[in-house]
Structures are given as structure tokens and as C-alpha cells.
Image (cartoon, coloured by chain):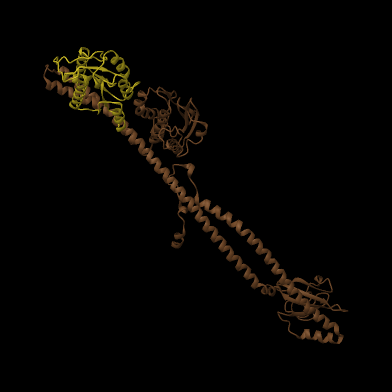
Amino acid sequence: MKQLKKFKPAFWDHRDVAGKHPQTSFNFRRKWKLLVLFTSFMALLPLFVMTLVDFSLTRRVIEDEVKSSMSKILNAAISSISFSTDLKKSALDYIVHSDPGKDNDIFVVNEDGTLLTPSFYYGKSGTPNAVNTKLFKEMAGIEKDVALNKKPVITGYARIKDSSLILVLTKCEEELTDLWLKPRLKLVGYLAISIMLILLSIMGTSTYLVRRIHSADRKRSEALHHAEYAKKLASIGRLASGVAHEINNPLAIINQKTGLIIDLLTMKKKLSSVERIVPLANDVLDTVKRCGTITRRLLDFARHMEPSIESVDIREVVGQVLAFLEKEAERRRITISIDIKDTIPNFECDKGSLQQIFLNLIENAFAAMEDGGLLTVAIKFKTKEELTITVSDNGIGISNEDIDKIFEPFYSSKNDHWGTGLGLSITYGLVKEINGDIRVKSRVGKGTRFTITLPLKNVEEN
Amino acid sequence: MSKRNAILTAAIRLSSPNGFKESQSYSKSNISKNLNFEMPSKVLLVDDEKEFVQTLSERLQMRDMGTAVVYGGKSALELIGNDTPEIMIIDLRMPVIDGIELLKQVKQTQPEIEIIVLTGHGSEQDKKTCMDLGAFAYMQKPVDINLLSDSLKKAYMKIKAVD
């Protein structure tokens, strides 16, 4: 078994580690088996046909040879019998007295098939109806028959002139097979070796090919994994720098307010009073609260970086994501409209994936829009068990050539904001991972709409 | 206690000369009416972060500078048309007209105004852009008041030297 394991190629026990991209999974073992089966069949079929043809040809040749040798013996016997009537008796005597052997079983029967002389295959002399004489239609010939012990035999016969006697020569068919055992063995050996060689080479090349495909596929999925990770890191980086910048503002306020308190206390040019300082200190506290909100938001986001299924309020998720982007939206005068009319119950889903999906789609929409654009996030029931989520913008749109490929990894249009060409393929992967579906509709210059269909699982009843 | 504080704060805000409105003239602190020729008398602060810019303005006034406050690039451009400041302190990220755009326009129309960029969002790239556009200094929030005062003093000295 250990020896076998050494030969087992790596793809045999391949499990798709990624698991995240159902569109890329590939059953290597099945592919290998199919390849081996198909090529084996195609390669071995003509071999078998040719061997069978050769087999039957050789068999016929050998049979003919046996038959001709038998008829020679019979002819010789008949001609010696008919040569002289005196000799007939002595010839018969010869037959009678000669022990019927396995090789040369020659005997005489009458019309009824009763043995007049003993036979090796048909029994002692006097046995009635031993030979089926109905087979002997001509004056002389060779027929196939079955002997007493059910052995297939070849029987040559010749009717003796002017008598009802028939001279019979019997040979066992096995003998005949013995004769061509050697060529048959040769044929079979040749066949076996050819099959072995063909199978080995087929398995070898198939294994090689599938192994190459497997390693290429693994490299590709590793690259995809890596890129996905990099994208995640980049998105964390962007969030972190955004948060850092956002915190700088309240910090600057705290800095100035406390500075002013110190100024008031130390510059003593005017009597500084409690009335002036307490409100300033309160302002500082308020600003600290503002910082706290920002850091809490980030913490909440970071908590959902690891995949985990939990009860999710989709309104809250959208809110959390938009909270991150509202500063940019404000700066760029982008109007964000949230359209959630139906009351959507909490359902089970991976919150982190949902956040990432929204973040990616909304970031994309922002990238596609001019300042002062309009972004709409709408959520409603499609059926009782399915949600439809649309994220639409009135940005530059996606051209017809691009739209079929935007979910492909590493596909990046000239207008791609981030340039990695991975944002949407990762979004696609994330949507598939939570058993959803994503579609896109777009018109150049008018805008783009992404529609996600999401199954509602384990809805929390309120 | 907190309610009382709130009332106090409101009272002070109402009585504060800067109030919560943008100021249309450069005012000096009530604390010090002395003239200090080393300090600029017309500093315009442009920032949409109102609490920050007001407090900063008050502290600069306490340091013998005359300051005015506006909350956006548009108001800033309107104001400098009427009453040209000596020095401007501007934020980068502001709605409608952002800091870089403002810097560009001011330097085109009134290059004699020295501009100090004070931002919480800056990157090295932003810094380079600003310096290339002719900013006098580029500072990161939160800034130390003494560093900012020094920078203002230097900018003012530069203006005086030109005159």
C-alpha cells in the first residue's frame, strides 16, 4: 500500500481548499478516470478486433490442416480396402486387432451406427447406435460430432463400396486445440503485453496532463486567494486611514479647547472664571465622545472580519457601512437614498460578508459618480423567502463589452477606480458564499444597478 | 449640573464676539488691545470644523493677532475680495470648494497672501501638491499652538520683508 501511495498523484485527494469559488471547483479524479477510460477504449478497440480476426484465421487454417490429414488417412484406408476383396478381410482384421488409440481411432460401423470394431471414443464393438450415421450423408467426408463422454470430436468417414459398412476415423478436438495452443498462447501473450503497454502509457500521460492542470489550477486559486487577502488588507488599510483622518479632527478640537483652557488659566490678563472654563471642558468631553463613536464603529467592523453566521438586521448593516462613507459623501455632495419600505425581520447570515459586499458596491458606485451624484440602496422582498437588494448610481455606467466580464477576476476596465480588477469578483464570491446571486444592469452615461438576491434563512420571529 | 453648564455655555456663546457666525471683519481679542507689530493683524481661518476653528481663532487673538473665521472656500473667496487678509490658514477637506482648489485660486488672484495649510487628512502627496502650489507651510492637525504661532510669525516676517 505504501508503494502505491508513492505513485498516487497529488490531485487524487484534491479538495478545493478555496471552497469559496464554486464556479472554479474541479473534480480531478473524475476527469482523470474519464480520460483514461476514453483513451483506453479508443486504443484497445482496434487491437482487440485485429487479434480476434487473426485468432479465427489461425484457427481455420489449423482446422483445415487437421481435416486434410484425416482425409488422407481415410483415403489410404479406403483405397487399400477396395484394392482387393481378399485384402478387405485382412484390412478389417487389422483394424479389429489393432488397439484403437487416442491418436488414431479408426473403426467400422454399419448403417445403424452399431460398432463392428471397438473404438476409443465410442465404446466396445457391438455397442448399438454408438455413432450418429445420419451425419454421414456423402460417400466420404469430415463432420463434427460428440463422443460418448461428451467430448467434442472430429469424425472422418468413408462408406465401403458395395457394403453397408462405414469406415470411421475419429480425432479428439482437444488435440486440434493442442496443435494451435502455441500460436494461441503467442497471440494472447502479445495481446496482454500490448494492453499493458498501452494502458501504462495512457495512465502515464493522463496522470501527467491532469497533474499539470491541477497544479495550474492550484496556482490560480492560490493567486486568487492571495489577491482576495490583499484586497481585504487594502480595504482595511483604507478604512484605517479614513478613520485616522476622521479622528484627527476631533483631536484637533480637543487640542484647541484644552489649549484655550490653559491659556485662560495662565495668561491671567483677564480674570478667568469657572463660567468660561467649564463649558470648554464640557466641549472637550463631547468631542471625546465623538472620537469614541468613530473607534466603536471601526471595532464593530473589525469584529466581523472573520466569517461567522449570526442573526443580522440588514438595516443596521447598511447603516454601519454608510457611516464609514458619509464623510466622503458629504464632501463630494453625493446624495444617499435608502429605500427600505418592507419590515425585514432579522435573519441568519454572515454579517462580515454582507458588510464587505455593501462596502465594495458602494465604493464602486462612488468611484463611478461625479460629485453631486445620487446613490440609492433599496431592499425589498422578492418572494417570502428571498430579499432583493439593489445598489444603483447615476454614474458613468459600464459599456456592453465590459459588462459580461466585470465579475471575472483580474478584469479591469480603464475606468476601474482601484485598478486591481478584483473588487467585483470578490463581491461575486462573497455573494455566492452566502448563497445569493448578483446581477448587473448598466447604461453608459446613465448609471449602473447591481441587484443581489439573498435567501432569508432562519428568520427570527418577533 | 450639566444643565446649568449648558445654560452657561449658551450665554457665553451669545455674548462671544465671534459667535457661531462667520465673522466679516478681523477682530482682536478683548483680553489684549495692545498693538504688536510682530504679529499679523489680518489672519483668515478657513475650516468647516466650526468648533475647532472658533477656538483656534480665540487663541490666536489672545496671542495678539487679528483673526476672522469662515467655514468654507466660497465664503473665503468672497471675503478676500472685500478685505484682503495677510495670511490664511486653510483646511484641505471642505465641501464644495476644497482646500487645494482654494489655494490654487487665491495664489492665482492674490499671490501676496501667504497660506498655511492645516489639515487632519493630509498625505505626503497632498503636502507636495500644496507646497508646489505655493503654500507657506503645511501642518497636520492636531497642531501645537506655539508651532502654528511661530509659523504665522515667520509668514508675517516674510510679508514685511517684501514690503
From the viewer's perspective, tell me whether residue A345 is left or right of residue B155: right
From the viewer's perspective, tell me whether residue A72 is left or right of residue A33: right
Quadrant housing residue A178: bottom right
The quadrant the N terminus of chain A occupies is bottom left
The quadrant the C terminus of chain A occupies is top left
| Chain displayed in yellow | B
Quadrant housing residue A306: top left
Q: Residue A395, relative to residue A10: is it above or below?
A: above
Q: Give the residue at x 56% y 60%.
A: A199
From the viewer's perspective, tell me whether residue A200 is left or right of residue A280: right
Q: Give the residue at x 28% y 12%.
A: B82
Where residue B160 appears, as percent x and y from the top left, is: 19, 20
Quadrant housing residue B56: top left
Q: Give the residue at x 30% y 14%.
A: B81
| Chain displayed in brown | A
Q: Is residue A181 in view from this perspective?
A: yes
Where residue A338 appears, as percent x and y from the top left, is: 41, 24
Q: From the viewer's side, name the closer residue of A310 and B139.
A: B139
Q: Is residue B121 in view from this perspective?
A: no
Q: From the viewer's side, name the closer residue of A198 and A456.
A: A198
Where residue A84 appears, as percent x and y from the top left, is: 86, 85
Where residue A432 appears, as percent x and y from the top left, is: 46, 38
Q: From the viewer's side, name the closer residue of B10 and A176.
A: B10
From the viewer's perspective, tell me whether residue A64 is left or right of residue A248: right
